[in-house]
Image (cartoon, rainbow, N blue to C red):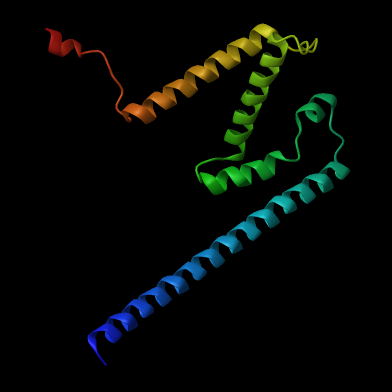
Amino acid sequence: MDLVGLAGLIVGLIALFVAIYGIRDVREQIKFLVTLERNRLFSNVIHTQALRLVKLDSDAERFQSNEMHGLSMLARAVDPKQTLDSVQEFTNNESLTLAQEMVNRGLGKWRDDIDENNVSEVLREWRNDKNAARLRKIFGESRLTEPSKDLMS
């Protein structure tokens, strides 16, 4: 066996190991996606079954979504720190933003039971929090603070 044959054998074995690793990785990802989809479908079934047992009042019915649990599962797959509450808060704020844009463009009117000023205040606070989080992501976790009064004396 000459040097070229030995090099070819080594390259072939390395390629084989890379292929086996790639196949294992893809199989794990497919298993994860199938499990995630099963859990999402299961949450929809549970939600439907629960609604057969419970009669919601009009306010709860308007804000109830059977897709919220599935959305939170997908969000947790992307970012494990997410919770059902954080996903629901984000979704509600994005819904308010879209609704406000629709009203501002004249495509609709606010319902009678919704206070436009309250919506504007909630969205303003949410945008401020979102912008502060973006700035922390850009500049790091250290916040700029005023000089200590001890240093100024």
Which one is in front, 140 or 47? 140
Q: Please report the residue visible at 65 percent of the width from the left and 6 percent of the height from the top.
A: 117
Give the image location of residue 116, x and y in percent: 69, 8
Q: Please report the residue visible at 33 percent of the width from the left and 77 percent of the height from the top.
A: 11
Q: Is residue 3 left or right of residue 18?
A: left
Q: Is residue 64 left or right of residue 19?
A: right
The quarter of the rendered structure image containing the C terminus is: top left
70 versus 4 height, above or below? above
Res 3 quadrant in image: bottom left
60 versus 33 height, above or below? above
Single out the residue that lies furthest toward the left: 153
Q: Please report the residue visible at 81 percent of the width from the left and 30 percent of the height from the top.
A: 61
Which one is in front, 57 or 124? 124
145 versus 38 height, above or below? above
Single out the residue that lies furthest toward the bottom: 1
Q: Is residue 112 left or right of residue 145?
A: right
6 versus 30 height, above or below? below
Give the image location of residue 33, x and y in percent: 61, 57
Which one is in front, 49 or 76? 76
Q: Is residue 5 left or right of residue 22?
A: left
Number of numbered discs overlaid on the protein picture: 0
Give the image location of residue 34, x and y in percent: 65, 60
Q: Please report the residue visible at 68 percent of the width from the left and 45 percent of the height from the top.
A: 70
Give the image location of residue 5, x and y in percent: 30, 86
The quarter of the rendered structure image containing the N terminus is: bottom left
Res 96 quadrant in image: top right
